[in-house]
Every structure is written in structure tokens, then in C-alpha cells.
Amino acid sequence: MPASNRNPLRVAVLADSDTRWKWGALTANRIVSDSRPESDGHRLSGFLLRGRATPTPRQLEEVGVRADSLREVTAVEFLREMERDAPDVIVLALVGGAVQAVLHGLARLTEDARLTGTAPKRPVVVTGYVGVVYEKLADGLLLRHGADVVLANSRQDAERFRAVYEGVGADASSVTEAALPFLGGAPYAGHDPYTVVFAAQPSVPDSAAHRTYLLRRLADHARLHPDREVLLKLRSKPGEHTTHIEELPYQKLAQRLEGGLPANCRLVYGHMGEVLDRTDLLVTVSSTAALESLHRRIPTAVLTDLGVREALGNHHFTGSGCLASWDQLDAGHLPVPDERWLARQGVAADGAYERAFDAAREKVTGLLADAAAGRIPPLKPYYSLTTARGYLPGILARHHLGPDGSPLPGAPAADRDPGPVRQIVRRAARGAYRHGVQRVAPVIRRMGEL
């Protein structure tokens, strides 16, 4: 621990996309405030995991969350930085496999320090989900097991998370109920002109026909209501990636839309909170933006046009009162949310949102005290070479770690910046990868369907 409790609490956030950076940084700010009362605030160091979804400067600017420092790293580089200068708290805002790899890497660092007789500094490790958990529940949760705190964004998620861990005989004490950290904003009060916003998602739906259908219905709604402003809120520009891969950008589909977009219908980017500031009706298939909208009491519609299906994620909203079709919205229907459903989702639950992070803060405070006293237990993920010998090594190898969590030979060095040639090769490789994902792969799939 720092020499004096007056020193700022030091927090590191490792994220692999723009939305996970937003979740991780905001979560860190919420759960460490007042977690060591005598400290002088906290210092946030940001690390972006190098990969297909590493956010661009434009995406980071749009997210609008600042850090005291921010740089791009590999998993091995991050672990070497943690070995050199460990913070007090680490927030892992990553896909499940990356969380598991970093947990094993951190566990190895602590064990190596113990074997060499040094006193390791054991950070408190926190992880969770960036939004609605509607797929791969068991897989994603078990890959996150081993962190000191696994945050659940609602009471419903906390119950499901504990059931999964207990069902496989894993310790469920890490599961802690909280809420999405980016809810907030002014309560809905109406606007002029009346504004309808469709919150697009990168991967849902995933077919050109279905995405074109949604785009056409949005344009038709604008034509049917010329007094309304109708906005298509996009997450990324072509060539940029976010948490999920977007193979069929709405920007390109709009260019080919028969009849084009009417004058009162346009594409917009920007911070979701700022868009919601002028929204009178939020429409989506299953975006987490629906929860942000419901928290503000903005009328919110989750579309049923393509069915209510697990593959779309809109099945999560059954019982919410928000399911509706474009035909109903065209006719003037406004969904009325079910209050009991909202409460279970941690959305505007009896006005107690600001207290939603109390349990997480209390838990982190206790863990920091344990770490200072040297009694915090070692990181112990459920997956090990005993429980998952055929699965775990592949996950670790993708992040250049061996089965024991140590770096494999040839892992990149963390003590030097990449040279000009390496930077050029890295940019070219990332561009080639994105071209393959967005252009080549869809063509191959279409050919396979012939």
C-alpha cells in the first residue's frame, strides 16, 4: 500500500473497446469514491487492450470519460506494468476470455513474488458486464470467475450470476449487485420538435435484409410524421469497431435505400446521453440504450418486428411493457413500462440509483483493508488445469500466456515503445483485419448460401 493514506488511491482500468472503456472508467469512479476515507481522492490510469476493437481517438472523445493517463497495451505488457508498479484496484472491462487470461497472469505474478520471498502488492480486482447479459451466460460468467468482485448490473443479474457459480460448485461471494454506471441525466420533459431516435446496434440484427427493413421502416415513420425529427443514432463510423463487429454499416445501407431518407430523417453520432437529452421516443431492437432511456422515463420501444428471440436479445425485455412493433408506433402507441420489471433491472428503482453502488464500495473498502493487512486471499479462478485442461490453455495462449499464466517466449516487451516500422505494420495489419471482417467475410458467407 502507499506510504501514506493521504496519497490518492490508484486505480487501473483495462478495456478492449469504446463501450467497455466507458463502463470500466465510470465504474471505477463510482466504486472507489470514499473507499479509503483518509485518502486524497483517486488517480485513474487507463489501458486499452490492443485488438480489433481498440477505440479510435474519435470514439474515445465521443465516450467523454477522461483518465489521468491512457495508453494501448497487450495483455502481457499490461501484466508487466502491474508487476513493475501495481495499483490499489484493477478494473477489467474486457470480453470474458481476456478477463480470464489477465486473472491467471495476475495470479502468477503474486505466486512468483511469494516464491522469491518478496512482498507482493495484491491489487483488488473488479470485473463485470457493460450492459444487458442475454447470451453465453454460463460461459461469460465462468471466464470472469476469480476476480474479487464480479459486478451485476441489477438484482436479476445478481441472482442469475450466483446461481451459475453455485451450480458448478464455484465460490459465489464475489457477485455484488450494483447498476449500470452511466445511467443518469435529466428526467424526460418533452421537446419541440418531437424527436424519435432509433438506437442502432453493431451486430443485431446481423442480416442485410433485416437491417434494411428496419432502416426502411424508420424512413417510413419519418414520412408518415413529417412534423417529427427522426434520428438514426449510430455507434461507429465505417472502419471503426466497437464491442461487437459491424459487418453491414447502416451508413452504407442508407446510401442504397430506395427513395433515400426523407428530409426529417438523418444519421447522428455523439454521446448517447446528449442524444437522449432531446429524445421523445427511443426505439431499439435490444440496445442497452433502452435502459438509459427508461431510467430517464423517456417512452421506450423494444421492437418485435423481427420476432422476440434470444439471438436478438429483445427476449430480455419480456415483461417490461416496452415490446412494440413499427406498425403500433406509426399509429401513435407509446409503451408504458412495468414498474416491477424496472426495479428488478436497477432502472429508476424507487429513486435510489445513487445508492446502487454502496455495496460495491463497501466490498472494495473491505478488500483494500485486507490487502493492506496482507490477508487478502490469492486470486483463484474456477478454470484451472484441473477443471478445464482442454479449454483454458487455448484461452491463455490467445493472449500470449502459457498454461501457468506466465508469458510465452517472444511476448512483446513492455519497457519500450514500438518503433516506426512496427507501428506501420501494426496499422496495416489492423486495417487488413477490418477489411477482411467487413468486406471479405460477408461475401464468403453469401457465396456459401448460394
Image (cartoon, rainbow, N blue to C red):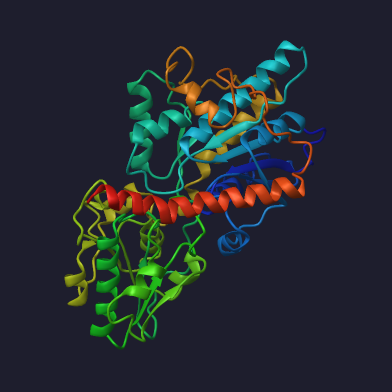
Of 288 and 344, nearer the camera is: 288
In the image, what residue occupies the spot 32% across and 22% down? 167
In the image, what residue occupies the spot 41% across and 60% down? 292
User: If the image is split into quadrants, where does the N terminus sit?
Assistant: top right
Measured as percent of width and height from the top left, residue 403 is found at 55, 19
Measured as percent of width and height from the top left, residue 256 is found at 33, 74
Measured as percent of width and height from the top left, residue 54 is found at 57, 50
Of 93 and 184, nearer the camera is: 93
Among the 4 quarters of the image, the one containing residue 141? top left
- Up the image or down, 447 lies above or below 414; here it is below
Number of marks present in the image shown: 0
Task: Look at the image and tell me whether residue 440 can be seen.
Answer: yes
- Up the image or down, 3 lies above or below 217; here it is above
In the image, what residue occupies the spot 33% across and 28% down? 163
Measured as percent of width and height from the top left, residue 254 is found at 36, 73
Of 156 and 354, nearer the camera is: 156
